[in-house]
Each structure stands twice: as structure tokens, then as C-alpha cells.
Amino acid sequence: MAFKFEDLRVWNLAIDLSTEISVLIKTFPPEEKFVLSTQIQRAADSVALNIAEGSTGQSNPEFKKFLGYSIRSGIEVVSCLFLGKKRKIISEEDFSRLYNSYDELIKKIQALKNSI
């Protein structure tokens, strides 16, 4: 693998979850296209993007800072999940599955951050 982030399990998990969010937002109604769907996708993408950006050519303190950004983006995704559930555009099943997945991802990113 050419880049350090490609070997990081948290990056791979973030990529997988961002893809799941992409599939989910295809079910959103048209009026949410430029509202919640855009926000949740950008936040989901940002989790992986910040891990990648911070891992390559950065000092350990700088990498930790980017992991912090990644955690915040994950929390933003979770908040968007709550909004979608409240608006009745995300099912309880999808909410629970993604909520638990992001909870696990955020814990793993925090553990990585603490290990640096």
C-alpha cells in the first residue's frame, strides 16, 4: 500500500460506513437532497478524509488533531441520524445499525488517538 492511512483499520471502517451512508441517502425524499442528505454525506466522508490527511507526513500531535476532527465528524453523522429518524426518513433499523457502527468507529479512533 502506498499511503500509511490505507493500513489503518479505522480508515477502512470509515470508508465502509461512508459508503453505507451513500446507500441510505438514496432513499431520502427529494426535499432532503440539499439539506440532510448533503450534510450527512459530507460528515461521513470527512471522518475518513481527516484520518487520511492527518496520517500522511504529519507529526504525532498533528495526527492527533486530525483524529479529533474525525471524531467530531463522526459525532455529526450521529446527530444527522437522529434528525433523519425524527423526520421519519431513517428507519429505526437503519438508525440503530448505523448508530452502533459509528459508536464503535468513534471509540476506535479515540483509542488510536490515545495510543499516539
Image (cartoon, rainbow, N blue to C red):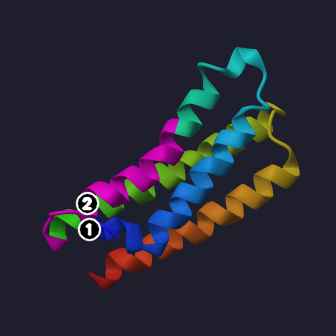
Identity of the residue drawn at 42% across and 80% down: 111
Seen in the picture, residue 115 relative to 10 is either above or below; the reply is: below
Count the numbered circles shown: 2
**x, y percent for residue 78:** 61, 50
**Is-magenta flag for residue 18?**
no
**x, y percent for residue 51:** 36, 60
> Neighbour class for label 2 at 10 Å: few (<14), some, many (≥20)?
many
Name the residue type under label 2.
Gly
**Is-magenta flag for residue 46?**
yes
In the picture, measured across the screen, residue 56 lies left or right of residue 27, that is left
Secondary element at image label 2: helix
Label number found at residue 29: none
Name the residue type under label 1.
Lys
**x, y percent for residue 76:** 52, 46
Where does label 2 land, which residue?
54
The answer to whether residue 84 is visible is yes
Label number found at residue 64: 1
Marks 2/1 in contact by CB < 8 Å: the verdict is yes
Identity of the residue drawn at 71% across and 41% down: 23
**x, y percent for residue 94:** 80, 51
Considering depth in this image, is 57 or 102 the residue closer to the camera?
A: 57
In the picture, measured across the screen, residue 115 lies left or right of residue 111, that is left
- In the rendered image, the residue lying farthest to the bottom is 115
Q: Distance between the residues labelled 2 and 1?
A: 8 Å
N-terminal-most mark, 2 or 1 = 2
- In the rendered image, the residue lying farthest to the front is 1
Seen in the picture, residue 7 relative to 37 is either above or below; the reply is: below
Which stretch did the figure color magenta?
42-60
